[in-house]
């Protein structure tokens, strides 16, 4: 019998929910809180030690070379992006092992990095639209390099698409990761973006998967497929889409969707999976299924990531927000999977990892060469953490292991910030983790935000006021062992 099962572990005060699992599954012992686990020894550094930076993305090639990309941030570097690579044995702890390209890029806000099957880097850049692009506020660009990639002159970029909306998404823009760019198993770049531009003709709104098969630094070679259904003036809305690709070229998307069917009947709102096996530029080749409710909130924010096995089976790491109908799922990290018939809701299953309530925001899910899940995430106190599972991971018998990738005190000691004289209450936060793995070694890139409480006394105002200000925004690279 297939049903939802709730299993309470008597005596531990811990609840486990298995979503659409076979009834009678084995109970799982209590999992220790990630914050109680001692972190493995880590090597770490700031890749942009002399400047502010943001939006770091890490990748690893099978020859064990490592690659990162990040943007400049504010001041003289705000219109630049950076690509760096390391082929040495000490990539995690020695910045001198890295070679770096500084690439001029006007308005760059975020960057994502992917590698081809033979190790060539590809970049996807989200930037502010140029001043002359009336009615647009974002531009989406693709860049590639085939050799000598630490020389900026060897990179070629093209603007592929633009969007325009009301910028409500800007509120969390530099706190929530984008996992919207991939290079598939056939070395073809793909990305997804959302648009709600009613200021142009014709209106352009939906969730657009952009695909290119060859000569991709020419805009004309990119094709658009809109996943959103449209009925007259009614259209589906997508938030926080993530994109994944399998070695066979199949694609998957996970997103929060305000959904309806082809007749216009409202469907469940929540996390949906969209899958496509071939010819994904045609909307009819995509299927979808409701997977789970998402919850709500901004701090922490409901977030998720998607990965596909080598044969295209979807896996999702989801951090549910507050206010879920299933109260035991609120602020929990959940692992979801489907092995066949993934266009039907009843074929999806899942279980919470139980690293501790409030732990798991901004999860980055990576499957290793054996298809085993590894996750980088944030703790409730905004430290970078790791989760790993080696056996029975798609079952109620999964045994997940957790650890802190790097305690927040490490970057604090390495680069203490000098606060303005009128500020105190300094807060350090890790944001937007990015993960690559090689065997039992994990490389985590994450953004580092430092804020402080500052006091102001205004003329003829008897009571001073306090405001939190951003003091520093940087990026960090950590190399450590996966949890044991």
Image (cartoon, helix red, strand yellow):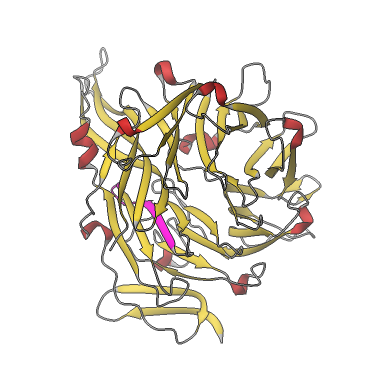
Left or right of 110, for residue 163: right
Q: Is residue 483 above or below residue 8?
A: above
Residue 308: in sight, yes or no?
yes
Residue 15 among magenta residues: no
| Percent coordinates x, y for residue 415 in the rendering | 22, 30
Residue 137: in sight, yes or no?
no
Left or right of 364, for residue 184: right
What is the quadrant of residue 15 in the picture? bottom left
Closer to the camera in the image, 350 or 56: 56
The quarter of the picture where the N terminus appears is bottom right
Over which residues does the magenta segment extend? Answer: 373-383
| Percent coordinates x, y for residue 12 in the rendering | 25, 76
| Percent coordinates x, y for residue 421 in the rendering | 18, 19
The quarter of the picture where the C terminus appears is bottom left
Question: Residue at horizontal 20%, vertical 33%?
Answer: 414
Total numbered labels: 0
């Amino acid at each position: 019998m297939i049903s939802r099962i709730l299993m309470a572990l008597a005596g531990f005060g811990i609840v486990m929910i298995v979503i659409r699992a076979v009834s009678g599954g084995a109970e799982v012992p209590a999992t220790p809180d990630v914050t109680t686990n001692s972190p493995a020894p880590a090597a770490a550094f700031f890749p942009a030690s002399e400047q502010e930076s943001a939006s770091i993305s890490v990748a690893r090639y099978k020859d064990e070379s490592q690659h990162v990309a990040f943007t400049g941030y504010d001041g003289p570097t705000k219109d630049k992006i950076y690509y760096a690579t390391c082929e040495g044995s000490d990539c995690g702890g020695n910045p001198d092992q890295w070679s770096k390209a500084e690439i001029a890029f006007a308005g760059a806000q975020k960057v994502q990095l992917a590698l081809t099957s033979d190790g060539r880097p590809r970049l996807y850049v989200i930037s502010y639209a140029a001043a002359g692009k009336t009615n647009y506020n974002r531009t989406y660009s693709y860049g590639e390099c085939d050799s000598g990639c630490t020389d900026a002159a060897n990179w070629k970029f093209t603007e592929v698409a633009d969007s325009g909306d009301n910028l409500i998404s800007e509120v969390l823009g530099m706190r929530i990761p984008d996992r919207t760019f991939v290079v598939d198993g056939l070395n073809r770049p793909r990305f997804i973006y959302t648009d709600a531009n009613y200021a142009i003709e014709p209106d352009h709104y939906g969730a657009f998967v952009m695909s290119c098969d060859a000569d991709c630094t020419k805009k004309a070679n990119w094709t658009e497929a809109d996943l959103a259904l449209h009925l007259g003036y009614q259209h589906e809305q997508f938030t926080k889409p993530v994109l994944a690709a399998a070695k066979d070229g199949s694609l998957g998307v996970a997103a929060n969707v305000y959904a309806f069917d082809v007749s216009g009947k409202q469907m469940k709102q929540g996390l949906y999976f969209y899958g496509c096996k071939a010819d994904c530029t045609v909307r009819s080749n995509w299927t979808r299924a409701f997977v789970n409710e998402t919850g709500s909130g901004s701090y922490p924010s409901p977030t998720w990531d998607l990965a596909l096995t080598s044969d295209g089976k979807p896996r999702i790491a989801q951090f549910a927000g507050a206010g879920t109908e299933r109260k035991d799922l609120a602020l929990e990290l959940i692992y979801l999977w489907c092995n066949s018939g993934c266009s039907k809701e009843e074929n999806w299953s899942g279980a919470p990892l139980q690293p501790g309530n409030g732990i798991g925001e901004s999860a980055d899910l990576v499957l290793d060469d054996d298809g085993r899940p590894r996750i980088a995430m944030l703790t409730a106190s905004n430290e970078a953490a790791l989760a790993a599972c080696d056996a029975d991971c798609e079952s109620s018998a999964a045994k997940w292991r957790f650890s802190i990738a790097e305690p927040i005190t490490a970057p604090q000691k390495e680069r203490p910030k000098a606060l303005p004289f009128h500020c105190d209450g300094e807060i350090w936060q890790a944001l937007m983790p990015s993960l690559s793995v090689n065997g039992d070694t994990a490389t985590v890139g994450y953004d580092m935000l430092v804020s402080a409480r500052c006091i102001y006394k205004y003329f003829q105002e008897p009571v001073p006021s306090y405001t939190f200000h951003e003091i520093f925004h940087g990026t960090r690279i950590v190399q450590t062992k996966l949890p044991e």
